[in-house]
Amino acid sequence: MATTGFQGAIFDVDGVLVDSPHERAWRQALRELMEGEWADIRDRTTWSPEAFTSEVYQRVISGRPRMSGALGALEHFRVPDAAGRAKVYADRKQRLIVGFIEAGEFTAFPDAIRFVLAVRAAGIPMAAASSSKNADRFLKRIRVDTFAERERLGHDFVRPGMTLYDLFAADLSGRDLAHGKPDPEIFLVSAAELGVPPEHCFVVEDAVSGVRAAKAGGMAALAVARAGDRALLAAARADLVVSSLDEVDVAALAEHRLAARRP
């Protein structure tokens, strides 16, 4: 079904669709290194278990490609030879996150699954565009057929065995691009793969860097404030900030508007 409004929707994954254990993996990986093979340089850093807060994660790691996030964290904690140590840190984090995923130690946000299904029902093609190379691992493990049945949603396009991954027409997650967010490259490539002009796409993000990337690419930005950061997302010029994607007026998408449902 064609739409006269938005013609493409681009979703970040971590923090938007999935409550992933990335923050836990980054924090645990650095602690293991600082208490193990990097113990000799620990006193020369500003790191401590308590210093690695969620605010630090959001500010220096979230939304960045893996190596960029690793370097950002090590520089933040003033780790000597941060550039030389970043790969070790990134590889340790990757081993941990794969283990968490395989153990099923993550959850999908129910409001996000409902919204993705509603956007698909509205005839708007979607792309997944996460900086994480693990995003497709999450999406392929989230069943939407059983979710739709449990929620009695009745979408006729949902088939047995369908996963969240199957709902996306394009997947840019973890692709090796020249620039990471807040550069708009990943979103511009997503729009191109959907065959939709950027100005007719909206991006769903939870991170300031992602909102800035969407706006830099000439796209509308829908921000979901899951970490109590509504003010920061609004300051980044998100077109709409919500606490839950259930608050979004799906009908307004056909009018090329991002709007909250009326109470």
Image (tube, helix red, strand yellow):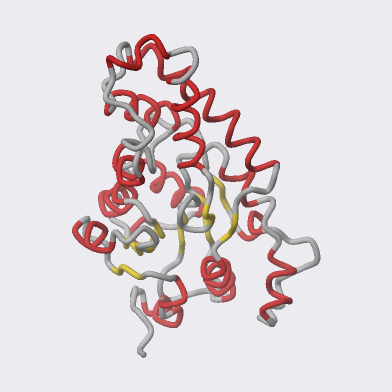
Residue 68 % position (x, y): 37, 28
Q: Is residue 32 above or below residue 20?
A: above
Location of residue 137 (image quadrant): top right
Residue drawn at (36%, 74%), measured in percent from left and top? 256
Marker count (numbered): 0
Q: Is residue 129 above or below residue 29?
A: below
Residue drawn at (44%, 52%), measured in percent from left and top? 191
Q: Is residue 225 above or below residue 35?
A: below
- Viewer-proximal residue, 39 or 65? 39
Outermost residue toward the left? 235
Residue 198 % position (x, y): 36, 55
- Viewer-proximal residue, 232 or 40? 40
What quarter of the picture does the C terminus occupy?
bottom left
Location of residue 151 (image quadrant): bottom right
What quarter of the picture does the N terminus occupy?
bottom right
Residue 2 % position (x, y): 53, 74
Outermost residue toward the bottom? 263
In this image, 78 relative to 118: left or right? Answer: left
Residue drawn at (46%, 52%), measured in percent from left and top? 12
Location of residue 67 (image quadrant): top left
Residue drawn at (43%, 44%), measured in percent from left and top? 189
Q: Is residue 22 above or below residue 246?
A: above
- Viewer-proximal residue, 32 or 4? 32
Residue 72 % position (x, y): 32, 29
